[in-house]
Amino acid sequence: MELRTYLHVIRKRWISILLVTALAVLVALGQTLTQTPTYDAHSQLFVSVKGGNSATDVTQGNMFAQNRVTSYVSLATSPRVLQAVADDLNLPGGSRKLAGRVAASAPPQTVLIDITASDADPELAARIANSTADELIKGVASVEDVSLVKLSVFERAEPPVSPSSPRPMMNLILGLVAGLLLGLGLAFIREVLNTRLRTQDDIERVVSAGILGTFVGDPSLEKTPVLTQGDPYSPRAEGFRQLRTHLSFTNLGGGHQSVVVSSSIPGEGKTSTAVNLAIMLAESGTRVLLIDADLRRPRVANYLGLEGSVGLTGVLTGSVALEDAIQTWGPAGQLHVLASGRLAPNPSELLGSSTMDKLLTHLESEYEVVIIDAPPLLPVTDPAVLAANASGILLVVSVDGRTKKADLARAVTNIEAVRARMLGVVINRLPATKGDHNYYDYKPQVDKGKRRSTEGRNRQEMRHGSLRP
């Protein structure tokens, strides 16, 4: 992953990361509050040896003492010493009870022995540390020549004022760090395992083509997919006007343009995109033809209320003349539509035939823009074949989770395999945000009488499948 990818994951899943971190801090806090405080008491012994008068004797004596210290440290926690401490203080459990509560160590290059005793009672902790020091001196005296080596208490233990554990601040810091690492780890694991498209960033990491249009998801569009059935100044209508403008910038060479509109899988909104884009092109005065080339599941005629049995298949088989198959739509017939025609048993052969290639060439010379609603790319090869003969392909991608990243990648591969030109991507069903309507509520103001007259005319036009102005 690149740094940009990591930042994207953090920005995308910051809430879950924050929740995991907060949970870890709460767990650390709970353990701190429920843990019994433990106090550490410290005593210190000094090991000395009888030295001679010369510097050599003193040096040898110090080295001898340092060597003996290591053995004395082990003796401090031996069962014999600890049992003597338990007997001295009348502690139940004997040496085994004290084994985990007493520790001894020696600072490097010294003749000092540090004894630490831990207990929930600070007074008892100090008594155990002092008793261990005393019993260690006795034990060493019983096995060592006291005329050569002497152990003495340098510092006696005092009851500690504050507990050594738990340490609230340290526990909270550890909980914070552990929670943050765990939250980040889970976020990255979820990102790796997440195979579905949910955001615009997901698409941009798969497709290098530009984003020509974005549309927010709306359940009501399933019943009213055509723009003339809603508000002509809605955010969706303005979005298609922007798509129309962005599409014009892809026509670098000028002249006439043929655009295949497709998607990776069914149900991503390619047909509604093709229809509404054609409507907006016709609204701007462009001479445009909309072709329903989805010969398996045609829907254009149904969307526009036109006759669907006469259309492309009849023209390709020679049973219907082109001029008889093209229908007009709109108040002045601005939009020309070539429906799919009757269902054919060989749609791939028809769309990939030389007849279709010649037809498309002829239509490009007759119309400024030809919009072709093609089948999805993955189930069939039809759209890739059409895109290879057209000016380019407009890929519609839904980000509501129905499309997988692998599906989109395969669709792009299919387009590249036939060397078709990718004009851009249209993102469909984006999650709605609070600011989606802020910049679109700039509608023309009309007086009430004129509004009633306009609304009546619009209702009349809708009955005839016409465009709104």
Image (spheres, helix red, strand yellow):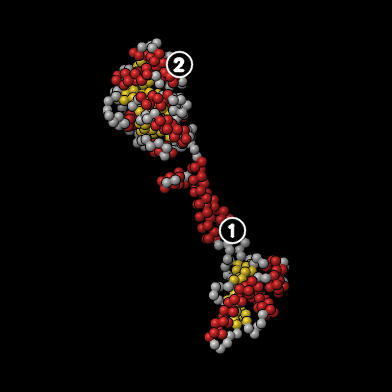
In the displayed image of the protein, which residue is found farthest to the left? 254
**Place of residue 381 in the rendered image (x, y in percent of width and height, measured from the top left):** 44, 25
Q: Residue at x 40, y 30 (%)?
A: 417
**Place of residue 346 in the rendered image (x, y in percent of width and height, measured from the top left):** 45, 18
**Place of residue 164 in the rendered image (x, y in percent of width and height, measured from the top left):** 58, 66
Would you say 72 lies left or right of 261 here?
Answer: right
Residue 163, can we see it? yes
Q: Residue at x 67, y 68 (%)?
A: 98
Residue 276, can we see it? no
Q: Residue at x 63, y 81 (%)?
A: 149
In the displayed image of the protein, which residue is found farthest to the bottom? 53
Task: Nearest to the eye among marks 2 and 1: give it.
Answer: 2
Q: If the image is split into quadrants, where does the N terminus sit?
A: top left
On the image, numbered disc 2 is attached to which residue? 344
Give the quadrant of residue 91.
bottom right
For the residue pair 13 and 388, the one nearer the viewer reads as: 388
Q: Residue at x 61, y 71 (%)?
A: 104
On the image, numbered disc 1 is attached to which residue? 33
Amino acid at the residue labelled 2: Ala
Mark 2 secondary-structure assignment: loop
Give the quadrant of residue 413.
top left
Q: Is residue 462 above or below residue 54?
A: above
Q: Does the CB distance between marks 2 and 1 fall below 8 Å? A: no
Mark 1 secondary-structure assignment: helix
Amino acid at the residue labelled 1: Leu
